[in-house]
Amino acid sequence: MSFNNKVRNTIRSQNSLVCVGLDVVPERIPDSIKKSSDPIFQFNKAIIDATKEYVIAYKPNLAFYEALGSEGWDILKKTVSYIPDGIIKIGDAKRGDIGSTAEQYAKGLWNLGFDAVTLNPYLGKDAIMPFIQDEDRGVFILCLTSNPSSMDFQKQKINGSPFYLKVAEKIEHWNEKGNCGLVAGATHGSELERIRKIAPTLPFLIPGIGAQGGDLTSVVLAGTDHLGEMAAINSSRGVLYASSGQNFAEEAGKVAHRLREEINYIRRKKRYRNQEISKNKDEGVIGS
Amino acid sequence: MSFNNKVRNTIRSQNSLVCVGLDVVPERIPDSIKKSSDPIFQFNKAIIDATKEYVIAYKPNLAFYEALGSEGWDILKKTVSYIPDGIIKIGDAKRGDIGSTAEQYAKGLWNLGFDAVTLNPYLGKDAIMPFIQDEDRGVFILCLTSNPSSMDFQKQKINGSPFYLKVAEKIEHWNEKGNCGLVAGATHGSELERIRKIAPTLPFLIPGIGAQGGDLTSVVLAGTDHLGEMAAINSSRGVLYASSGQNFAEEAGKVAHRLREEINYIRRKKRYRNQEISKNKDEGVIGS
């Protein structure tokens, strides 16, 4: 099965668009778990156990593990293998290098056990190809990121159209095996809509709600496909650090659950609105 | 001392522009060393011992170490600490992420012992800032890469001017502490000249000679500053795999030595030409 079909199936079976970013800094691990022999893995494990019912994906960002050196790499591998089957494992690596080097990156990242990785488009197709050889393994390519300085380059105009739309066009074109998606930040509501028009069915990985300030309603309305699907909406700090007490995992579970429900409420509104539009079209209300 | 001044001083003290890319794949390690307990580190050590007289920098690309998992990370750390003082240690990581994540990447990369790292510009200034806080640590930011698909995005036109020149302009502007440089591929002779005009004194890291086909003469003429300095010209496979026999290190040393001499010959021509131009200017030949 192609990776993108797997995303759609997981969204349906979990009835969720929630992705949890496993971006742990040692300083923020609750005291109750700090003393264990393997605190970061134990923390991830507890978070996964408490949230797995409500999510479609986990997304560890490699930076947080690399900061811990080779030990971090081991913790990451253990964490990925602990994620249950049926939940998507996304390595947020944002790699990008020339073809022969990209092959090495692919080797390292697939060895960690990921189903998909994030990649940077700057080097063009060479940097992407080694990752999309197998249809069951996917990529999310940076299109429009959630940070303030995304404007430095991503919003530069090419023939009147912003650069990130050029990226979206290319990726839509490269998606021959059904395993390419886009990273589109939640901090850009109206821009998300423009990207969705160019890539109507690609899965979008959407970071930037919560700590980064993206508005959930506009993100769900603009970021999902016409069925209210094909988006993975990421929350990291909001879930991981829902509580610093002994009940951290329970609270993380509650936050993930609530986020799923909030998102699903907006999805229902979108589906209802779309049904109304198509009903009105059938009845000739629009265009009459 | 600022990183960029350190680059200039190292170029003068070593009388070289050669950078050696330590991008080792286990399959290509000579049989004579394959049986040792720590073959990749032993290989790197032998290459460093044989070439250190002729180089200004070593540049391990992280992809090749990540492909080996956590053990690769340990080999990389040992390799970096084996590089002698006075030689620049560049981590070819091409990282790029939002500010809070970039801080984690910086932590991991500086912990490995690098003096400088390569970064991807796609996320803008946020992704760069955590790396350029200390003037003695530097960055080389991807401008124009050496791979064929660099044309996909880097050569797109913004107001008639290619995207990579926009990147060069921004980096020239961000170089407040004298620790920013650019990656500019050797496979683009005339484009290198345009980048050099925008960033007359920044250090350029230039991959793409040898296996990738970049022309050495045009690279040295176009890529160095007006003094024939401020460029690190990288060779990886050409040096590492100069021989697959027991004499691999000796042959690597010869190749690095020869490369330095070839480059220095072109640098002398450039300086001579520049002196002639300035002499002619003084004598009123040009413009008369």
Image (cartoon, coloured by chain):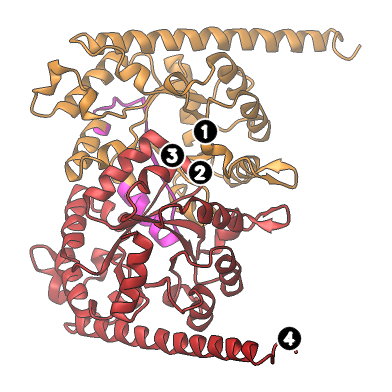
Chain colours: A red, B orange
Which residue: 48% across, 81% down?
A: A216
Marks 2/1: CA distance?
Answer: 9 Å
Q: Give the range drawn in magenta.
A: B80-108
Which residue is the site of mark 4?
Answer: A287
Which residue: 59% across, 17% down?
A: B218
| Crowd around label 2: few <14 · some 14–19 · many ≥20 (10 Å) | many
Q: Mark 1 lies on which chain?
A: B
Q: Earlier in the sequence, mark 4 or mark 2?
A: 2
Marks 4/1: CA distance?
Answer: 49 Å
Q: Which chain carries label 2?
A: A
- Whether callout 4 and callout 2 share a subunit is answered yes
Residue A231, position as x, y percentages in the image: 43, 71
Please tell me the numbered disc located at residue B136: 3
- Indicate yes or no whether the magenta region holds residue B6: no
Q: What residue type is labelled 2?
A: Gly
Q: What residue type is labelled 1?
A: Pro
- In depth, the one of A154 and A183 nearer the eye is A183
Q: Is mark 1 on a helix, strand or loop?
A: helix
| Crowd around label 4: few <14 · some 14–19 · many ≥20 (10 Å) | few
